[in-house]
Image (tube, grey):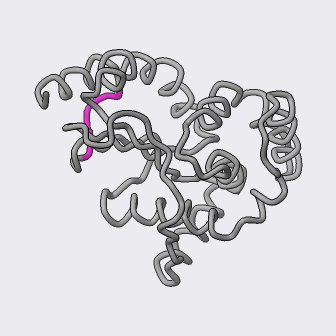
Amino acid sequence: MKKIFLAIITSLLLFFPVKSDTNINSIYEGNKNAKIEIIVFESLTCSHCASFHKEIYPKLKKDFVDNGFVKIVFKSFPLDLAALNASKIAHCNNDGNSKILHLLYEKQNDWVKGEKIEDFNSNLRKIIKDENIELDFDECLDNKLLEDHILQQRIEGVKKYKVNATPTIIINEKKFDKSLTYKNLKKIIEKLI
């Protein structure tokens, strides 16, 4: 089902581009004017993306983002409908804040389960409610502008950076092609500082 979803979305997006709303903020952390910009194309249902957020990202944040050297931008590259809906929830407050995004990766095993999209949505709704996050869940899922923004990020990933897997890391407009470890990222970043 995942492959069918990807094939349909990719072919539709290539022939019928969606409109991007410039009023929707990207999710990012760090100094807006940092010398180094890291873009992470990721899917909220991707276990490797969750591992990145749990194991590599905290070290990047501590060593480079918090010190102003790096701006990290999280771009949506949904691999399935559940990831698309989760991305809408992560972007819904439109404040650029990464709190909900990190929460959804932290609790990925709690919501990425079920047989139908309604199961995934119900699991997502429970997490948002349990964490007392203020947002209108149904309104977020129905938000066409958010959906267009997220799908536009996916199109950008494919067209501009040749993204074909998640997570894909772009450092100062160049695709990171080494094994995704903190050690390898740190070497590249230190060369750019």
In this picture, residue 35 sits left or right of residue 183:
left
Count of residue discs = 0
Residue 33 placement: quadrant: top left
Q: Residue at x 44, y 46 (%)?
A: 41
Q: In the image, is residue 139 part of the stretch drawn in magenta?
A: no
As rendered, which of 80 and 58 lies closer to the eye? 58
Q: Is residue 133 above or below residue 115?
A: above
Q: Is residue 58 above or below residue 167?
A: above
Location of the N terminus by quadrant is bottom right
Can you give x and y, in whole percent of width and height, for residue 172 in the image?
Answer: 22, 45
Per the picture, the main secondary structure of the magenta-coloured stretch is loop
As rendered, which of 12 and 107 lies closer to the eye? 107
Q: Residue at x 56, y 45 (%)?
A: 43
Can you give x and y, in whole percent of width and height, for residue 150 in the image?
Answer: 56, 60
Q: Is residue 97 above or below residue 94?
A: above
Q: Residue at x 48, y 51 (%)?
A: 26
Location of the C terminus by quadrant is top left
Can you give x and y, in whole percent of width and height, for residue 24 in the image?
Answer: 54, 60
As rendered, which of 73 and 95 lies closer to the eye? 95
Residue 38 placement: quadrant: top left
Question: Which segment did they paint magenta?
Answer: 175-180
Q: Residue at x 31, y 57 (%)?
A: 161
Residue 30 placement: quadrant: top left
In this picture, residue 93 sits left or right of residue 95:
right
In this picture, residue 173 sits left or right of residue 137:
left
> Which residue is farthest bottom?
15
Can you give x and y, in whole percent of width and height, for residue 81 in the image?
Answer: 70, 56
